[in-house]
Amino acid sequence: MMMMKQQQHSITTTSPSSARATSGPVAIGAAAERAGVSARMVRHYESLGLLPGVSRTDSGYRQYSEADVHTLRFIRRSRDLGFSMDEIATLLGLWKDKDRASAHVKKVAQAHIDNLSERIAAMQTIQRSLQTLVQCCHGDDEPNCPILDDLAAEAEPAKTSKKKKR
């Protein structure tokens, strides 16, 4: 019975909220969980140089500090907002540079907004085209289908726009 109470106590002291309070280095799985990403993504971010200098144990296991976990959260939030890896690298550099000008950060964010607006407009054009095709289709048992006819139409390939390097 005494052993059971000790086990229950240890279970309650290792809850997620108390695990977050730990300031010592943690393994990749714990760091990933705290940051809300997968261990695979942690390794990916590290390979891209977004998370440099992760320490390792004598046996080669990665050890992540609270600062590393904070950086992973920054990356996750940036990805949630749709920033590219290059943009995230720039934002991370600015975040760590305490002498940065906020104007530079705003410029990166505004360029991202402009890119999103262009992509949204392109998606809306696609949506309108598809809506027109769907309205033209009877959707009955007949084999004639204006959607397939349009997809099979011999047209010149659309010109691809070149992405601007930032």
Image (tube, rainbow, N blue to C red):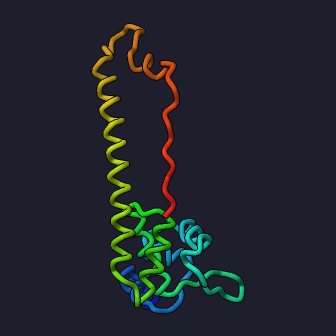
> Is residue 130 shown above or below 115?
above
Residue 8 visible at all: no
Q: Is residue 49 above or below residue 144?
A: below
- Residue at x-position 35% and y-position 42%: 123
Q: In the image, residue 59 lies at what x, y percent? A: 71, 84
Q: Residue at x 35, y 54 (%)?
A: 116
Image point (47%, 86%), residue name: 67
Q: In screen coordinates, is 91 left or right of 51?
A: left
91 horizontally vs 64: left or right:
left
Q: Nearer the viewer, residue 132 or 1?
A: 132
Q: Nearer the viewer, residue 95 or 44?
A: 95
Q: Quadrant of the rendered structure where residue 57 is? A: bottom right
The N terminus - image quarter: bottom left
Q: Say which residue appears at 44% left-offset and 16% top-offset.
A: 149
Horizontal and vertical percent for residue 41? Answer: 54, 66
The residue lying furthest to the left in this view is 135
How many badges with numbers are in the image?
0
Given residues 65 and 18, the one toward you in this image is: 65
Nearest the viewer among 140 and 47 is: 47
Q: Is residue 47 visible?
A: yes
Vertical arrangement, residue 100 with respect to residue 105, above or below: below
Instruction: Give residue 92's position: percent from left, percent from top.
Output: 46, 77
Residue 31 in the image: above or below residue 2: above
Q: Is residue 31 left or right of residue 56?
A: left
Direction top: furthest residue? 142
- Can you give x and y, in whole percent of width and height, for residue 68 in the image? 50, 83
